[in-house]
Amino acid sequence: MPDLARLVPLGASAARELVVTHELTVQHAYPSLPPVYATPQMIFALEMAAADAIAALLPSGWGSVGTRVEVSHLAATPVGMRVRAEARVVEVGARHVRFACTAHDAHEIIGEGWHERAPVELARFVEGVARKTAGVDRH
């Protein structure tokens, strides 16, 4: 395991921007609900911003996987509105990196909370998934 405290500085950050489409709404999955930005889609954008914040800081052949999410979805965002998801490193442990996350639309903060990611050696991670896949009962 690399020395994360040496590699990942506090304050490292990244952002992702997107425009809410119908496919990103809760109505896409549940037609009886309104056409507003879905909470899982917001969380995904926050996770990807966090991954972006540390991707270039990790050794070659390493990436990160999400391990914990604690996010509040505070306001609805309609189709067509732009969303900005931001993640900033606030803690670096021996095996995890913790991020403060916020999401904004054109009018207000729509989400905020915490996310943790664990750096992984990608080849080793993929091997573990392959072993697990081989043992899956497909019946």
Image (cartoon, rainbow, N blue to C red):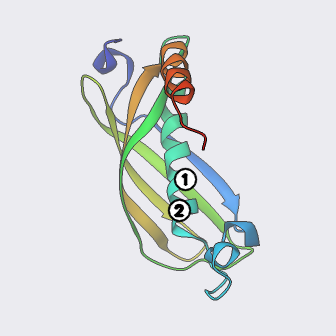
Q: Residue at x 55, y 14 (%)?
A: 123
For mark 1, give the secondary structure. helix
Q: Residue at x 53, y 16 (%)?
A: 127
Q: List the residue tagged with mark 2.
A: 40
Q: Is residue 101 above or below residue 5?
A: below
For mark 2, give the secondary structure. helix
Q: Residue at x 49, y 12 (%)?
A: 59
- Residue 92, horizontal then vertical, whole percent: 28, 30
- What's the residue type where badge 1 is placed? Phe
Dividing the image into 4 quarters, which one contains the N terminus? top left
Q: Residue at x 53, y 18 (%)?
A: 122
Which of the 4 quarters of the picture holds residue 5? top left
Q: CA distance from mark 1 to mark 2?
A: 6 Å
Q: List the residue tagged with mark 1.
A: 44
Q: Are marks 1 and 2 in contact (CB under 8 Å)?
A: yes
Dividing the image into 4 quarters, which one contains the C terminus? top right
